[in-house]
Amino acid sequence: MPKEPNASAQLPSSGTIQTDPLTETSQKWFEYPVRAQPHHTDYAGVVWHGTYIAWMEEARVEYLRSIGINYANLVALGFDLPVVELSLRYHTPLRMGEAAIVKTRTNNMQGVRINWDYQIQSLDGQQLYVSGRVTLVAIDREKGKVMRQLPPALKDIFV
């Protein structure tokens, strides 16, 4: 018989991470700094659209780490949070060598669905490059099925 994920298990703390003025939360947003490297861009030196998605995931994982959830520990407990919906709006191109801030926050949880908002902005906040939304759901890794409710380890943090 397959082992059920331990819904009452608690995630161990991932430890304290060094805080940087650029990664502190402000107005409920978690801020994650990035810089457009050559491998992030197309031949015109403009950031390739898939790079923004990778940066958004990095910011989401670092946000979780900042509140004590190490993603590897979450997976070890038998559940995962795959993306089931993704929406992006491109406002202004970000170019090679430019730095930006990926801002993320959770918004409007519905059952096992966790909605995340994103803004990728210039360091001074004056230029909006990309805005987006991602929806994650909790799944039982062994069964590969959506869970009926968020595991307590996550519910306690997000609710």
Image (cartoon, rainbow, N blue to C red):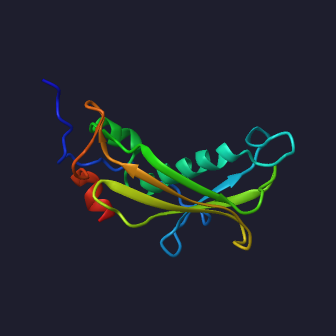
**Quadrant of the image occupied by residue 32:** bottom right
Q: In the displayed structure, would residue 52 be above or below residue 31?
A: above
Residue 67 visible in the snapshot: no
**In the drawing, does residue 12 fall left or right of residue 128?**
left
Task: Identify the residue at horizontal 54%, vertical 61% (top origin).
Answer: 19
Between 40 and 16, the one nearer to me in the picture: 40
Percent position (x, y) of residue 133?
A: 52, 59
Between 130 and 26, the one nearer to me in the picture: 130
Percent position (x, y) of residue 23?
A: 57, 62
**In the drawing, does residue 1 fall left or right of residue 155?**
left
- The number of discs equals 0
**In the drawing, does residue 156 fall left or right of residue 107?**
left
Q: In the displayed structure, would residue 99 be above or below residue 144?
A: below
Q: Quadrant of the N terminus?
A: top left
Q: In the displayed structure, would residue 14 be above or below residue 31?
A: above
Task: Identify the residue at horizontal 74%, vertical 69% (top origin).
Answer: 127
Percent position (x, y) of residue 26?
A: 53, 73
Q: Quadrant of the C terminus?
A: bottom left
Between 58 and 111, the one nearer to me in the picture: 111
Task: Identify the residue at horizontal 35%, vertical 55% (top origin).
Answer: 113
Residue lying at the far left in this picture: please name it: 1
Residue lying at the far right in this picture: please name it: 44
Residue 48 visible in the snapshot: yes
Percent position (x, y) of residue 54?
A: 60, 45
Residue lying at the far bottom in this picture: please name it: 27
**Quadrant of the image occupied by residue 39:** top right
